[in-house]
């Protein structure tokens, strides 16, 4: 049975889940009703859409297929597209009529149109930046276009409103709603994935997105694991709790192993060939005055760019383990919270549910009442650290080796932001040892605990030194709260990256 109470109103979905934080309706099966929002969290689809992403648009929208086929730097036949010749801007201004998208009932078409208008937007405003980046031999991006024409802006804003999304390219647009299986009977491993839309058009771009999909295909198991852990804590069932933590460990290990295949599917050297087009307009020097959406408002807009930071796997685990609560109250954490608004409303509501539920029933407190459970909890923290550590390695090899640009695609400071969270989780692994009584541990858990604690402690010291060194080469890495408008710090603990990621002590 799928969730029949869902309607295509994203606001309604948000309300349903927020009305009662002790329950959250998760899809148990694939819906038959095509008005159910594509990004509804489910035990089968997890954080992927519940239906296969729509690859081709029906009339009267086929003109968008045509334009997007012509756009990529390299078209499907390998010849240069409009972005390579610098003619995309003029082409789309002239060729695209102002289409009416105000009343789209089918959730697949609604999301496909939103995806496609965000592609048109990013290609339009960032076309000059990539050409500048090539002309200056990777030195800088110059300025982007500061006005988005009405034939793109008006429909995009309407679609975003219908979805409760930002009118800008989110992670869902570039990654989780932008793929097809090559063999429809196969799974979503990277070799079986091709893209619906390209920005650059290389196999490295396909590989980059495909590895994300290969990881997110396991998020259905993760959603089930999370629910089982929460149920076990509510029942105060220790045996069941330990079994569930072990199952979740298996899932997280699979996801981390899939992450490692990035090196195989997408080369570090090729990443910067498509990275420009996924940049945002917020906290980016290419858009000092933002972007005006013509026909909508003369007020400039500022949006974060596409980023894996909008994926829901890691935030879900952060929230379940109550790690989010130990993040320092600094501007980096403020950015992390801001990122959470750049995702489907149902994902955001799910994240809030997990966060509130874990706190109210005390997942961490329950874990730390037993030394062996605490080690399993610590092992899960270690998987979050493994994810973030792999990720920091990607950033050093795919980005820092080739670019001195100070901001990541999502607008976070490239040197200090990721280490803020990485250091927090490493510190949490070290701190949790206060709850472990070695003489109560099984032989297996004792070995694991010693190994995990030592590893985190060493990595933390290396990371701190590394960040201080790297900061010298990148300007503006220490930011203040003003950059994250709307965020109210509870208490300013630090504004300096010198003490980034100091987790608060774990309190049971
Ligand atoms: C070559 C591969 C990758 C590179 C270079 C890269 C780069 C980055 C950067 C620079 C950030 C900082 C946020 C921002 O954009 O402003 C970020 C955040 C993030 N990315 Fe990636 N990414 C890669 C692959 C992935 C993959 C495969 C995933 C899997 C879903 C992922 C998930 C995340 C998450 C969850 C965050 C937030 C991290 C946190 O909470 O500490 N990334 N990424």
Image (cartoon, grey):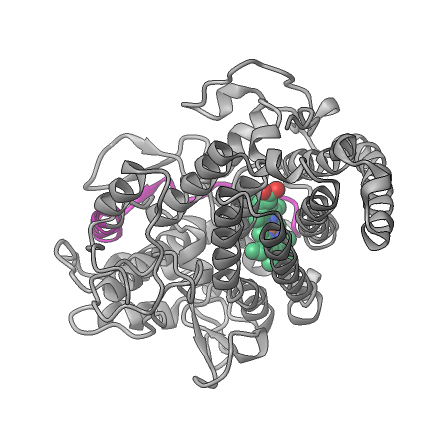
Q: Is residue 104 above or below residue 20?
A: below
The spot of residue 249 in percent (x, y) is 65, 57
Q: Which residues are magenta?
A: 138-162
Q: Is residue 505 above or below residue 336?
A: above
Residue at image position (69%, 42%) is: 404
The spot of residue 107 in percent (x, y) is 24, 62
Q: Quadrant of residue 487?
A: top left
Verify whether residue 140 appears in magenta.
yes
Is residue 135 in view from this perspective?
no
Q: Is residue 90 above or below residue 23?
A: below
Looking at the picture, tell me which residue is in the foreground, 434 or 82: 434
Looking at the picture, tell me which residue is in the foreground, 200 or 259: 259
Badge count: 0
The spot of residue 78 in percent (x, y) is 51, 79
Location of the C terminus by quadrant is top right
The spot of residue 196 in percent (x, y) is 41, 71
Is residue 437 in view from this perspective?
yes
Q: Is residue 24 left or right of residue 505?
A: left
Residue at image position (50%, 72%) is: 74
């Amino acid at each position: 049975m799928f969730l029949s109470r869902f309607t295509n109103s994203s606001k309604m979905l948000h309300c349903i889940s927020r009305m009662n934080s002790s329950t959250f309706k998760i899809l148990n099966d694939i819906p038959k009703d095509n008005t159910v929002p594509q990004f509804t969290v489910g035990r089968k689809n997890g954080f992927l859409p519940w239906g296969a992403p729509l690859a081709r648009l029906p009339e009267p929208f086929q003109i968008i297929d045509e334009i997007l086929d012509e756009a990529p730097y390299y078209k499907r036949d390998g010849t240069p597209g409009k972005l390579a010749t610098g003619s995309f801007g003029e082409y789309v201004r002239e060729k695209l009529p102002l289409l009416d998208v105000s009343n789209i009932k089918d959730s697949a078409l609604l999301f496909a149109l939103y995806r496609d208008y965000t592609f048109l937007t990013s290609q339009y405003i960032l076309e000059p930046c990539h050409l500048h980046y090539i002309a200056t031999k990777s030195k800088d991006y110059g300025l982007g276009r500061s006005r988005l024409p009405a034939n793109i802006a008006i429909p995009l804003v309407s679609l975003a409103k219908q979805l409760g999304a930002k009118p800008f390219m989110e992670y869902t647009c570039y990654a989780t709603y932008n793929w097809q299986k090559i063999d429809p009977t196969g799974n979503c491993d990277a070799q079986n994935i091709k893209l619906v839309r390209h920005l650059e058009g290389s196999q490295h771009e396909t590989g980059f997105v495909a590895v994300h999909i290969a990881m997110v295909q396991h998020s259905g198991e993760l959603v089930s694991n999370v629910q089982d852990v929460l149920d076990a804590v509510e029942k105060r069932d220790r045996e069941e709790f330990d079994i569930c933590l072990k199952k979740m460990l298996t899932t997280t290990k699979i996801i981390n192993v899939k992450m490692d295949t990035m090196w195989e599917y997408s080369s570090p050297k090729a990443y910067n060939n498509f990275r420009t087009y996924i940049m945002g307009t917020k906290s980016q020097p290419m858009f000092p005055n933002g972007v005006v959406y013509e026909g909508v408002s003369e007020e400039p807009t500022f949006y974060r760019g596409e980023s894996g930071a909008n994926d829901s796997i890691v935030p879900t685990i952060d929230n379940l383990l109550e790690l989010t609560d130990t993040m320092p109250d600094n501007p980096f954490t403020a950015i992390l919270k801001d990122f959470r608004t750049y995702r489907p409303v149902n994902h955001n509501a799910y994240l809030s549910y997990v966060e509130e539920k874990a706190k109210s029933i005390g997942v961490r407190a329950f874990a730390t009442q037993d030394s062996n459970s605490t080690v399993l909890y610590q092992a899960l923290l270690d998987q979050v650290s493994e994810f973030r550590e792999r990720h920091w390695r990607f950033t050093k090899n795919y980005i820092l080796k080739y670019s001195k640009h100070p901001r990541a695609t999502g607008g976070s400071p490239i040197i200090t932001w990721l280490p803020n969270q990485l250091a927090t989780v490493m510190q949490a692994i070290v701190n949790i040892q206060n709850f472990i009584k070695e003489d109560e541990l099984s032989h297996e858990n004792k070995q694991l605990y010693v190994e995990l604690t030592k590893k985190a402690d060493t990595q933390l010291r290396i990371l701190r030194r590394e960040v201080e060194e790297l900061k010298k080469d990148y300007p503006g890495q220490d930011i203040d709260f003003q950059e994250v408008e709307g965020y109210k710090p509870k208490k300013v603990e630090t504004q300096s990256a010198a003490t980034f990621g100091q987790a608060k002590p774990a309190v049971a």
